[in-house]
Image (cartoon, helix red, strand yellow):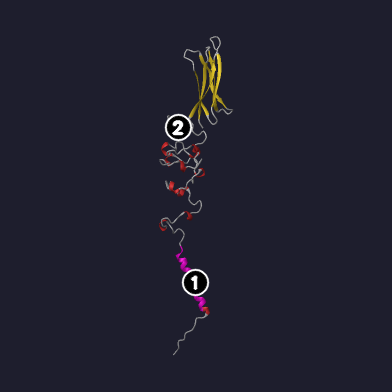
């Protein structure tokens, strides 16, 4: 009859057992790894993909659905001129009142970005277009509708005048005098006129009335010459309308 005896495992047996456990663990991990292409839309929770999960430049134009980018999704000033393709904006791309003063970076939208007729009055919010959004000489006559600009929309102006007294004229010899009126610094002359203090039967005439300009052609005042064919003294006045700065 054989007797059963207990024996401790040898060191070699311990090492072999540990190696077997490690090997089985590695096989189990490989079995649970995700194969390529296995994660789709259904496997993603809502909100799972945030900005930190997106690589720089990962979202291209072909990844965006129509009307998918709204004002709330855009940070202030995020769309500048480099982000807008030339000739890319047309009327159908703009919602009514979508373009306001706060949504346009200074100088971002130039003529090359807009298709002909893209921006209509219904696409602009109230007070959306301010002086800083308009380029120098950008608004010409053909850009303004008939009756669109009234007196209240224009800057104020003031009339400045100068007077000269003319006397000693006769039917055989007229007496003349010149009057000159100037606008103040920063003002621009926009209109010229003359007047006399004589009666309707007096022989009084305006020889000329014209703007006074700077070397670059900016009107800064007015000058006029009057002639009198009567002996009594008469006051000849030149007026200039000056647009306020």
User: Residue 34, how many percent across, how many down?
Assistant: 45, 62
Q: Which residue was labeled with disc 2? A: 153
Neighbours of disc 2 within 10 Å: few (<14), some (14-19), many (20+): few
**SS label for mark 2:** helix
**SS label for mark 1:** helix
SS assignment for the magenta stretch, majority? helix
Kindly identify the residue that appears in the image at 48 percent across and 55 percent down.
Answer: 52
- On the question of residue 149 being in view, the answer is no
User: Residue 144, how many percent across, how many down?
Assistant: 45, 31
Query: Taking 32 as reference, is 239 above or below it?
Result: above
User: Residue 228, how many percent across, how many down?
Assistant: 53, 14
Which quarter of the rendering shows the N terminus? bottom left
> Could you tell me how many numbered marks the image carries?
2
Query: Taking 197 as reference, is 159 above or below it?
Result: below
Q: Nearer the viewer, residue 175 or 128?
A: 175
Neighbours of disc 1 within 10 Å: few (<14), some (14-19), many (20+): few
Determine the CA span between mark 1 and mark 2.
85 Å
C-beta proximity under 8 Å, tags 1 and 2: no
Kindly identify the residue that appears in the image at 47 percent across and 67 percent down.
Answer: 29
Among all residues in the image, which is located at the extreme bottom?
A: 1
Q: Which residues are magenta?
A: 13-33
Q: Is residue 165 magenta?
A: no
Among all residues in the image, which is located at the extreme right?
A: 215
Q: Nearer the viewer, residue 120 or 220?
A: 220
Mark 1 or mark 2: which is in front?
2
- On the question of residue 175 being in view, the answer is yes
Query: Taking 183 as reference, is 225 above or below it?
Result: above
Kindly identify the residue that appears in the image at 51 percent across and 77 percent down.
Answer: 14
Q: Which residue was labeled with disc 1? A: 22
Q: Nearer the viewer, residue 56 or 130?
A: 130
User: Residue 140, how many percent across, how many down?
Assistant: 49, 31
Indicate which disc, 1 or 2, sits on the residue closer to the N terminus: 1
């Amino acid at each position: 009859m054989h007797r059963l005896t207990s024996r401790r495992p040898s060191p070699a047996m311990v090492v072999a057992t540990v190696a077997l456990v490690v090997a089985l663990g590695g096989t189990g991990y490989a079995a649970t790894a995700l194969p390529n292409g296995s994660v789709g839309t259904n496997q993603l929770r809502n909100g799972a993909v945030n900005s930190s999960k997106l690589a720089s430049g990962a979202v291209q134009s072909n990844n965006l659905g129509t009307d998918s980018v709204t004002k709330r999704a855009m940070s202030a000033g995020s769309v500048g001129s480099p982000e807008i393709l030339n000739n890319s904006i047309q009327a159908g791309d703009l919602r009514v009142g979508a373009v306001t003063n706060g949504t346009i970076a200074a100088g971002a939208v130039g003529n090359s970005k807009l298709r002909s007729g893209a921006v209509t009055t219904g696409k602009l919010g109230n007070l959306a277009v301010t002086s800083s959004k308009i380029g120098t000489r950008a608004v010409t006559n053909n850009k303004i509708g008939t009756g669109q600009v009234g007196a209240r929309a224009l800057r104020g102006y003031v009339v400045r005048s100068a007077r000269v007294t003319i006397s000693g004229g006769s039917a055989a010899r007229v007496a003349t005098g010149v009057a000159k009126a100037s606008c103040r610094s920063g003002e621009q002359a926009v209109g010229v006129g003359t007047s006399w203090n004589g009666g309707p039967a007096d022989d009084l005439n305006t020889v000329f009335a014209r703007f006074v300009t700077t070397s670059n052609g900016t009107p800064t005042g007015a000058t006029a010459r009057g002639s009198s064919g009567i002996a009594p003294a008469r006051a000849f006045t030149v007026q200039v309308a000056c647009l306020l700065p």
